[in-house]
Amino acid sequence: MGGFSSQYRPVVEQLATRWVGHPTELFDSIDSTNRYLKQVVERGSASPGQAVWADQQVEGRGRRDRSWWSPPGLNIYTSVAVVLPDDRTPSLVSLLAGVALVNAVNELSHASVAALKWPNDCVIEGYKFAGVLVEAVPLDRLWAVIGMGINVNQPPHPEFPHALSLKEALGRSFDRGTLWEHLMRSLEEAFDSWRREGDAWVLDQWTRRSATLGQDVAIIEPGRPVWFGFAERVDADGGLWVRRDGVPVKIMAGDVSVRRPDGSYS
């Protein structure tokens, strides 16, 4: 057992949740936490709430198979397997995970600094510090693997000028074990609320934390020219409604950049 696994094993063993994070496998290094856990689910050997947490990913990735810089000793790379409720909208699980992640960060930092950018980014003052990647696994029940990467204590990286870490944003280092525990608890609370209160709860919570709605935005869709509009609301299935030249347009996939006060987009 390596240094990371030895250091954080007590955090995992003392995790005070009912089902999220039980069990959790720790890895000093892994290709991708999502890839590994998805394979466990596909083999039929996963339990709801089972998690993976790694010190380093050598093939970390985000949406649309983009690479995710995943150095050791600095950040959080974790994935959780869940069974989606039959009477809930599956596409909302990505929004729900974002709400849980932002709640965990704001609770630990004692400030409402973190917000959500559609569809799956977590930002502070417009700069991305975390992302969510959800992959569905349809078996006898519909499973989802929720991958979450958080830039915790990493220094600035010249290749990623629009990203930052919690340490950069808030001026202090964060204990990764404490943040991971907050994240697991927050995800369990959010998932239980979704089951109990329905899709409207997810949409309301995401809207309250949105850094996208009510803003001028640039929309980047695969194979199409960039276009501009005003982000109005998220739909019942998680799609984003953007008003373009006075006409509402719904987008389900793509990237959104929000207009800054200086006129630039990020």
Image: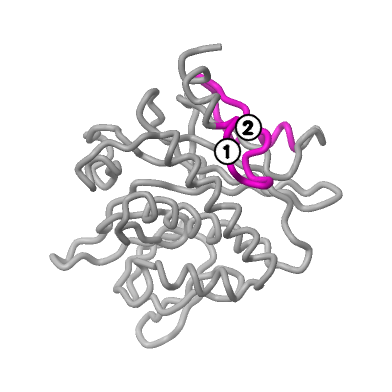
Q: Is residue 33 magenta?
A: yes
Q: Amino acid at mark 1?
A: Leu
Residue positioned 59% across, 43% down in the render: 16
Instruction: Name the element at disc 1.
Output: loop
Residue 205: give its label: none
Q: Which residues are magenta?
A: 12-41
Residue beneath disc 1: 15
Callout 2 crowding tier (Cα within 10 Å): few <14, some 14–19, many ≥20: some
Left or right of 81 on screen, residue 255:
left
Question: In terms of depth relative to the viewer, which is nearer, 9 or 249?
Answer: 9
> Residue 169 in the image: x percent, y percent?
23, 47
- Locate the N terminus and report the quarter of the image it occupies: top right
Q: Report x, y in % for residue 31.
A: 54, 24
Residue 234 horizontal side relative to residue 219, left or right: right
Q: Residue at x 35, y 63 (%)?
A: 226
Q: Which numbered disc flags the more N-terminal residue, 2 or 1? A: 1
Q: Residue furthest right?
A: 140
Q: What residue type is disc 2 on?
A: Thr
Find out whether residue 232 is within the magenta segment. Answer: no
Residue marked by disc 2: 24
Residue furthest top in the image:
1
